Image: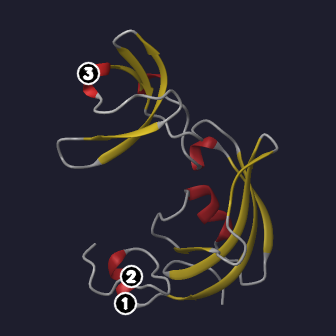
Amino acid sequence: MNISENKVVEIEYTLTVNGEVVDQSESGEPLTYLQGHGNIIPGLEQALDGHAAGDQLQVTVQPEDGYGERDEEAIQIIAREDFDDDIEVGATYFAQAEDGSVTPFTVVSLEGDDVTVDFNPPLAGEVLNFDVTVKSVRDATPDELEHGHAHGDDAHEDDDF
């Protein structure tokens, strides 16, 4: 069976940026996703389309098909008083918008009462290099299609998504 829209796919992968490993699946614990539903970055999803279990491939994803280009306007200064806890440079925090959505950001620097934060994804602007092995491909269940993501062994039949 080949990878196509509405297939549940399991992959093992190693992600490198500038020759450094920045992420990888755990041995025996592949990443499981639903093809065609935006569960993984677009460039990797497109490259996997048409492949089958057992295929091994190397994929290079440009920023526009990964986490996007860096946006200098996404770097902002926030008042220290807006933080509940101690602030740590390099730490990731989460901002909640009025609509309830949550956006992660990273603290870049602290100067007096000013906290400089970066709302760019950590890998924005980076060329991503994946070594991927396709472990399995199967048809999605009706629940998975309804929810828009794959369910693992701990399927959540009663969850509302």
Q: Earlier in the sequence, mark 3 or mark 1?
A: 3
Residue of label 3: 81
Decide which of 145, 118 is in the foreground and name it: 118
Neighbourhood count class around disc 3 (C-alpha, 10 Å): few under 14, some 14–19, many 20 upward: few
| Kind of residue sitting beneath label 1 | Pro
| Kind of residue sitting beneath label 2 | Leu
The answer to whether the residue labelled 1 contacts the one labelled 2, judged by CB atoms less than 8 Å apart, is: yes
Q: Secondary structure at mark 1?
A: helix
Q: Residue at x 61, y 35 (%)?
A: 125
On residue 145, the disc is 2
Res 95 quadrant in image: top left
On residue 26, the disc is none
State the quadrant of the N terminus: bottom right
Q: Position of residue 20 (x, y in %)?
A: 78, 44
Q: Secondary structure at mark 2?
A: helix
- Specify the farthest residue to the front: 86
Q: Position of residue 109 (x, y in %)?
A: 49, 19
Q: Secondary structure at mark 3?
A: helix
Q: Residue at x 26, y 26 (%)?
A: 82
In the figure, is residue 86 to the left or right of 58? left
Q: Position of residue 8 (x, y in %)?
A: 54, 82
Residue of label 1: 142
Cα–Cα gap, marks 3 and 2? 44 Å
